[in-house]
Amino acid sequence: MYKRKEVKKISNTLDKEIVNLINEQIWLENNASFYYLYLSTQFNMNGYSGISKFFLEQSNEERVHMLKLIEYLLDEDITPQIPNYNYLEDLDEKFNLLNHFENSLMNEKRVTNSIIEIVSKCKEKRDIKTENFMQWFVIEQREEENKFKSIIDDIKIIGNSGSGLFELNKQLSSLPEEE
Ligand code: FEO
């Protein structure tokens, strides 16, 4: 009689280390969301309503990123760790247009590194599904970093020019919204 070849069982649950890294990523995205919300209020208070709107949209985007990760874990029947604090305890930034954008770029680089760490772990654990899912974030981070770099370049050219700052504020109020 034909004997069915035994199929090697493959675990369907996510590797613990990968889950931990995704939970850390959830924390980082939430942190970024609150950081940009903070900057949005700072720019508003200093008369830059356009840049304030730009950072509010950034903040909303980061929240969407966090939700994507939460949804991924839920789809895998894993309880995500919801960050239980949001405040940026060590934050001590005096209002400075260029510094805020440079710090935002640094923040994005930190997020990128963390995403690369997840992708590397996925490769090590041969978790193609999560690796595939994370590719969206890899592309997104490239766009985010380039966006901040290009604004920083503009700010350096503008310097203290009032009309330049007026234009920048206007431009950033109407950047196309992303996912
Ligand atoms: Fe979701 Fe800009 O990192």
Image (cartoon, rainbow, N blue to C red):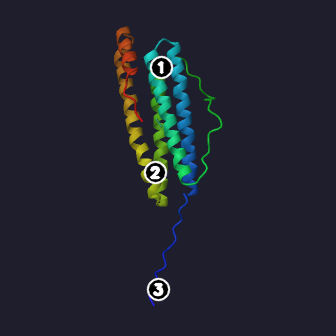
Contact, CB < 8 Å: mark 3 with mark 2?
no
13 lies left or right of 128: right
Mark 3 vs mark 2, CA separation in Å: 39 Å
Residue 78, horizontal then vertical, whole percent: 59, 53
Residue for badge 2: 119
Q: In terms of image quadrants, where is residue 89?
A: top right
Earlier-in-chain disc, 3 versus 2: 3
Farthest top residue?
162
Earlier-in-chain disc, 2 versus 1: 1
In this picture, is 65 found above or below 9? above
Earlier-in-chain disc, 3 versus 1: 3
Residue type at numbered disc 3? Lys
Residue for badge 1: 52
Q: Which residue is at a point 51% across and 49% down the rendered structure image?
A: 72
Residue 105, horizontal then vertical, whole percent: 45, 31
Quadrant including the C terminus: top left
How crowded pointer 3 is (Cα within 10 Å; few <14, some 14-19, many 20+) is rated as: few
Residue type at numbered disc 1? Ser
Q: Which residue is at a point 55% across and 24% down the rendered structure image?
A: 38
Residue 16, horizontal then vertical, whole percent: 58, 56
Mark 3 vs mark 1, CA separation in Å: 68 Å
Q: Which residue is at a point 53% across and 32% down the rendered structure image?
A: 33
- Marks 2, 1: nearer the viewer: 1
> For the residue labelled by badge 1, is the local secondary structure a helix, a strand or a loop?
helix
Farthest front residue?
1
Residue type at numbered disc 2? Val
Mark 2 vs mark 1, CA separation in Å: 33 Å
Residue for badge 3: 3
How crowded pointer 1 is (Cα within 10 Å; few <14, some 14-19, many 20+) is rated as: many
Q: Which mark is residue 27?
A: none
